Amino acid sequence: MLDIRYVRDNQEAVAQAMANRNFPWDAELFASLDEQRREAISAEESLQAERNAASKEIGKLMGAGKKEEAEAAKEQVRQINEKLAEASAKREEVDAKLNDILVGSPNIPCDATPVGKDESENPERRRWGTPREFDFDFKPHWDLGTDLDILDFDRGNKLSGSRFTVLGGAGARLERALINYFLDTHTSRGFKEWWPPIVVKRQTMFGTGQLPKFEDDAYHVSGDNFLIPTAEVVLTNLHAGEVLDAADLPKWYTAFTPCFREEAGSAGRDTRGIIRQHQFDKVEMVKFATPEDSDAQLESMTAEAEYLLQQLELPYRVISLCTGDLGFSARQTYDVEVWLPSYNAYKEISSCSNCGDFQARRANIKYRDPANFKGTRYVHTLNGSGLPAGRTMAAILENYQQADGSIRVPDVLVPYMGGMEYIKAEA
């Protein structure tokens, strides 16, 4: 969430940042509420001082045997308490309204984030690999998977409804191979693996910014709990309410989890195949860093996602999300987009974000560094896909398809596939 002191001291800059994000920021309302809060606090402090003075006077009067005067002073204290209760209620009411504004407003983009109105103004940073030119009529992954009997959309719909898919045979094996390959790669390169729960409390979802704004996209389960939309939620909140040591930063975490999203409002978008599912498998990366180091950590996290695609030999490009396309909790984001022949376009496969202290403020994650400052400060949190198994599978099926309908298995995955070099239709 936003830092109220920063907003108060930088109201013009905040208003401009929110305008750049296409967010309806009411600067006059914030200023008015903030002034009301100051007045309520001043009234509280004045009444408390008045009550303290009157209470002391009561003691003196009682000690002097002046009971009648003491009773009058007690009545004065009672009246002061009533006024104090009113002032406190006013402050609490204003605090709640201000908190709603701070909690419901997106993060402020950093200077490195390009200004733009929407995804059409996301600048491309770099490309790797060359999209394949086919000398035969290539197929989309949903047809390839069905022909090979490794993706079953009909049975997924029968079991659970639309946007659920059953993987069978080599498809199930490929999903597992991708997950293990991603985890093995990350852990060999400095990430600590976790195996977290996928059912979380409301506060946990709040900590990373999924709630309250995106509750319609979340899957509710028993009580006031939720299925996670990404392992970012659990990995980031591992340190909720904690104070870390600067000497232990940065922390690099990774985890595989199934992910669940209602995808409210996404009707008609990428509904064919396994690009946009209600349930999907993903390996996530999360980092905790000092403010001075977080920009460098974003670059290295993005490079980690790129490394996976390079090892899989899948063409991709990296773009910077502009202010109008930036996610709610992010201050800067790189999207890595893999080439999908069926779309004749690059499609997002990893989104790596630096959230600054936005999530840390919500989840109360701080760090201490006695050599450089007194007390504690909020850490910076970062997250990125590394990678989603489903979208990666779609990219492999389409980019590695052969003229006979089989799929060549990328070299780095052959050991994970038990030596299988081609996925072919069963005889």
Image (cartoon, rainbow, N blue to C red):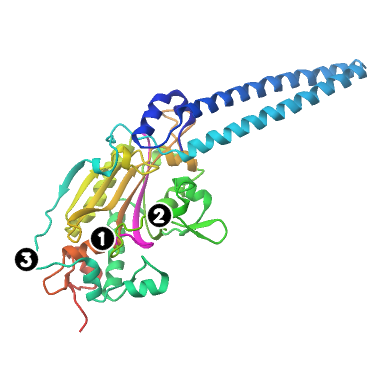
Relative height, residue 36 to residue 247 (above, below)? above
Q: CA distance from mark 1 to mark 2?
A: 17 Å
The reply to whether the C-beta atoms of the residues labelled 1 and 3 are less than 8 Å apart is: no
Is 97 above or below relative to 259? Answer: above
Q: Amino acid at mark 3?
A: Asp
Residue at 32% across, 39% down? 324
Residue 135, disc:
3
Mark 1 is on which residue type? Thr
Three-letter code for the amino acid on which mark 2 is drawn:
Ala
Q: Secondary structure at mark 1?
A: helix
| Quadrant the C terminus occupies | bottom left
Q: CA distance from mark 1 to mark 3?
A: 23 Å
Image mark for residue 231: 2
| Residue at figure coordinates x 39%, y 74% from the top left | 158
Q: Residue furthest front?
A: 268
Front-most of 408 and 122?
122
Q: Nearer the viewer, residue 294 or 46?
A: 46
Instruction: From the image, state whether disc 3 or disc 2 is nearer to you.
Output: 3
Say which quarter of the image contains residue 111.
Answer: top left
Callout 3: few (<14), some (14-19), or many (20+) C-alpha neighbours within 10 Å? few
What element does badge 2 sit on?
loop
Dot 3 or dot 2: first in sequence order is 3
Q: Earlier in the sequence, mark 1 or mark 3?
A: 3
Q: Main secondary structure of the magenta part?
A: strand
Answer whether residue 339 is magenta in the image. no
Residue 243 appears in the picture as rendered:
no
For the residues marked 3 and 2, what is the alpha-carbon distance in whole angstroms?
40 Å
Residue at the spot of label 1:
392
